[in-house]
């Protein structure tokens, strides 16, 4: 040190783990609205008169009307000798509540042969069903939040650790961070069966259920929420296309049986009024558009 030199090290630093947030894979169209949107600050138009941006009608000024609502152009044309003032009446802008429910009890790759090793949760090449589910939820959340809606996340295997409803860019970042940090994998030590009873959700909330539908539990929850009046969309997050080894006859036959049961469950959901969509962005965008048109028809 007297010569101006200092020798130090080696120093063991703290390990650094990079965290990759779920990607917003595609720009999705706005999804369906509940029959009665509850909020007052969103970008969706309702039929309730009040403060908003959509014109409802123009009428003569009445006691209680706000002065800033006076339409001077209409007044100039229609006032007449009595100099009647005319005011603009608008429809309330509303927002929706959206709850994304992830069924993370199974983590399946596209390689069907690997399904036999469900207890082995080492990192596998390629995307698994949980990867697809997380990216799908992130994309759906971004689409709704962009329109001023509130979005929350519920892991069906950990219903006591939800992401509560929120809106805005900061909430979207919080939601994506939660998905990256806390989305459980099967065998992580905190596995729980799917809830027997459907958790209570905010009245009128839109429900999106992501699952591979290997059993009846997620479908039963989706149907229960639908019967309670919630608009529900089921998303199949099984990676596609599946890889089957034709030489492995036993595995191929077992896979066909499992896939046939899956198709039957999804047909049951469709019959109960719960549309089922693939997680592919194009298919998901089409399903959201169709569901939105259907919801408009019901409200009319």
Image (cartoon, rainbow, N blue to C red):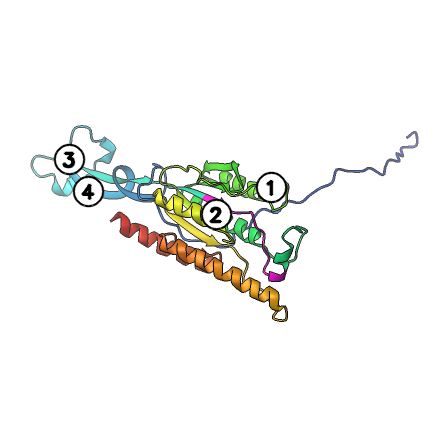
**Picture quadrant of residue 242:** bottom right
Q: Residue at x 38, y 56 (%)?
A: 270
Between circles 1 and 2, the one closer to the viewer is 2
Q: Magenta stretch?
A: 100-113
Residue underneath mark 4 = 57
Query: How far, Cα to Cα, is label 4 from label 3?
Result: 14 Å
Residue under numbered circle 1: 181
Taking the image as shown, residue 115 lies to the left or right of residue 210, namely right
Query: Marks 2 and 4: which is nearer the front?
Result: 2
Nearest the viewer among 15 and 242 is 242
Q: Mark 4, residues whose alpha carbon is within 10 Å: few (<14), some, or many (≥20)? A: few
Residue bearing the label numbered 3 = 85
State yes or no: residue 112 in magenta: yes
> Tag 3 or tag 4, which sits nearer the N-term?
4
Q: Which of the two residues, 165 or 82, is positioned nearer the viewer here?
A: 165
Q: Is residue 143 visible?
A: no
- Residue for badge 2: 217
């Amino acid at each position: 040190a007297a010569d101006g030199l200092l020798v130090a090290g080696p120093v063991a630093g703290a390990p650094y783990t990079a965290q990759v947030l779920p990607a917003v894979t595609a720009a999705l169209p706005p999804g369906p609205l509940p029959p009665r949107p509850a909020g007052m600050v969103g970008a969706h138009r309702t039929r309730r008169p009040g403060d908003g941006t959509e014109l409802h009608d123009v009428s003569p000024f009445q006691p209680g009307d706000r002065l800033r609502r006076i339409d001077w152009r209409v007044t100039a044309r229609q006032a007449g000798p009595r100099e009647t003032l005319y005011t603009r009446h608008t429809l309330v802008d509303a927002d929706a509540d959206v709850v994304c429910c992830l069924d993370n009890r199974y983590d399946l790759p596209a390689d069907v042969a690997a399904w036999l090793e469900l207890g082995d949760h080492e990192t596998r090449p390629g995307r698994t069903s949980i990867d697809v589910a997380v990216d799908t939820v992130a994309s759906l959340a971004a689409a709704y939040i962009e329109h001023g809606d509130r979005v929350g996340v519920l892991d069906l295997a950990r219903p006591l650790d939800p992401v509560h409803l929120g809106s805005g860019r900061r909430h979207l970042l919080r939601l994506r961070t939660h998905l990256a940090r806390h989305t459980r994998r099967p065998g992580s030590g905190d596995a729980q069966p799917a809830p027997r009873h459907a958790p209570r959700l905010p009245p009128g909330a839109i429900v999106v259920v992501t699952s591979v539908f290997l059993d009846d539990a997620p479908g039963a929850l989706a149907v229960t929420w639908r019967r309670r009046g919630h608009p529900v969309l089921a998303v199949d997050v099984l990676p596609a296309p599946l890889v089957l080894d034709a030489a492995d006859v036993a595995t191929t036959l077992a896979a066909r049986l499992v896939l046939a049961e899956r198709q039957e469950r999804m047909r049951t959901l469709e019959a109960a009024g719960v549309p089922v969509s693939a997680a592919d962005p194009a298919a998901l965008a089409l399903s959201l558009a169709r569901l939105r048109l259907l919801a408009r028809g019901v409200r009319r």
